[in-house]
Amino acid sequence: MDHFLYRDGALFAEDVPVAEIAAAVGTPFYVYSTATLLRHFQAFDEALEEMDHLVCYAMKANSNQAVLRTLAQAGAGMDVVSEGEYRRARAAGVSGDKIVFSGVGKTDREIRVALEGGIRQFNVESEPEMEVLNAVALELGKVAPITIRVNPDVDAKTHEKIATGKSENKFGIPIARAREVYAMAAGLTGLKIVGIDVHIGSQLVDLAPFEQAYRKVAELTEQLRADGHTISRLDLGGGLGIPYERSNEAPPLPSQYGAMVQRVLGHLGCEIEIEPGRLIAGNAGLLVSEVIYVKSGEGRDFLILDAAMNDLIRPAMYEAYHEIVPVIEAAAGSEKQPYDIVGPVCETGDTFAKQRDMVPLVAGDLVAFRSAGAYGAVMASEYNSRPLIPEVMVHGDQFAVIRARPTFDEMINRDTIPEWLEAHSVP
Ligand code: LLP
């Protein structure tokens, strides 16, 4: 559930009309709902309440400082995958002991920054990484708490670009080799083993692959304990999916996920960490855009929007479905008609939806993409020299710009002209 509902035919973000925000900040823009973010965080927090746990929000989904601060104030930890994310989490007020560091290619420098700044644990993904981590820790006179990410070879049954738990994926250590790698870690004095990490993919709409993976983790926990390791923490990753197409998708709820975790892993007495990103932020955000033109093509009508693939790349990149709704509801009884909904970028891939049934729209109308709070703004680019679009946060009847639209000069002046070109003017 989210807090983007119609009232008297107008779409609201909590208690603010979306059209009012559009008038204030201009389109396109992202808008996030505080109440929805908190609701989703709490759903996970409550789902795991029977167990010692920490919900570490996967901030790659949406790393705006205001989003991070909202969740951190509610008690969330963070899952980071880069120095930039680590610094953002710290800047948002998250303490190091609530930050887990994931990622397959942590650099020496990133490891150093996190070890010096404070970190809950590193989720180590390979032997070479383990060696670098050990060396940096020893050099700094610290002991790095680690889990090792295991790859359980489970088919997450999601889009191939976001599946991570199959043996052919680049992530983690094959679970069959885990005992050997844990033994190696135990011999490195700069490291302290605290648990096991697993993450099998994103936008999973079924609990079965999770359960398959977690059963393997349960078995491994017992083996590793028998080998003499301390396994007190299980990081179960993120990945629980959201309903992008509400009319025919009903992925499991956090409560059902939590009950499964309790059933499969509860007996081990471990602290549970989870890293949800999409489920917390996805349905907490809209992308709002204006129709620039309605163009009649060969046998089809195009809705040309002022938002494009550079603002929301998910449809172009993953063939992702986003519901697109009018900001002002059509009069009762208006017949829907099919549109190809596209952006202004100069490639055919800049298509948000094909033959999507919509109420008739005209230039100047506003539309909202639902489920755009995760992997929307964070994946945006300035392709076609389109400045990054602003982000707005709503809290009850208040709203605030949480990242302003840059000016064209700000965008252009980030480039610098080398001296040898400065010397000559353009004829
Ligand atoms: N933990 C790890 C180690 C991850 O790699 C990810 C996502 C998560 C947690 C959070 O997964 P979530 O709960 O959000 O599903 N850009 C893609 C999604 C990429 C996900 C990458 N890893 C998209 O727009 O669908």
Image (tube, grey):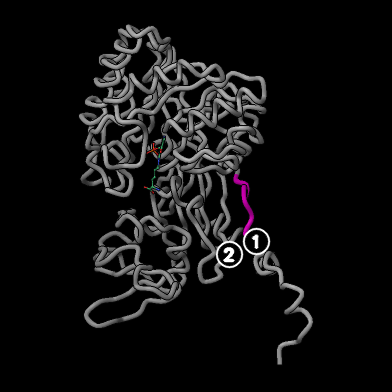
Q: Which residue is drawn at 26% across and 20% down?
A: 260
* Residue neighbourhood size for the residue with mark 1, other residues' Cα within 10 Å, grouped as few (<14), some (14–19), many (≥20): few
Distance from the alpha carbon under mark 2 to that under mark 1: 6 Å
Q: How many labels does the image show?
A: 2
Q: Where is residue 94 in the image (x, y as percent from the top left)?
A: 61, 28
Q: What stretch is highlighted in magenta?
A: 399-405
Q: Where is residue 330 in the image (x, y as percent from the top left)?
A: 34, 61
Q: Position of residue 138 (x, y in %)?
A: 62, 22
For marks 2 and 1 on the same chain, the one whose residue lies earlier in the sequence: 2
Using residue 21 as the reference point, say whether residue 199 is left or right of it: left
- Report the predominant secondary structure element of the magenta stretch: strand
**Residue type at mark 2?**
Pro
Tag 2's secondary structure?
A: loop
Q: In which quarter of the image is ligand 1?
A: top left
| Location of residue 90 (image quadrant) | top right
Q: Residue 268 carries which label?
A: none
**Residue type at mark 1?**
Pro
Tag 1's secondary structure?
A: loop
Residue 85's place in the image compared with 338, above or below, is above
Residue 305's place in the image compared with 260, above or below, is below
Q: Name the residue under label 2.
A: 387
Q: Name the residue under label 1.
A: 406
Q: Which residue is drawn at 65% across and 61% down?
A: 406
Q: Is residue 79 magenta?
A: no
Q: Nearer the viewer, residue 329 or 53?
A: 53
Residue 43's place in the image compared with 271, above or below, is below
Whether ligand 1 has any atom under 8 Å from the Cβ at mark 2 is answered as no
State which quarter of the image contains the N terminus. Answer: top left
Q: Residue at x 37, y 33 (%)?
A: 172
Whether residue 40 appears in this view of the structure is no
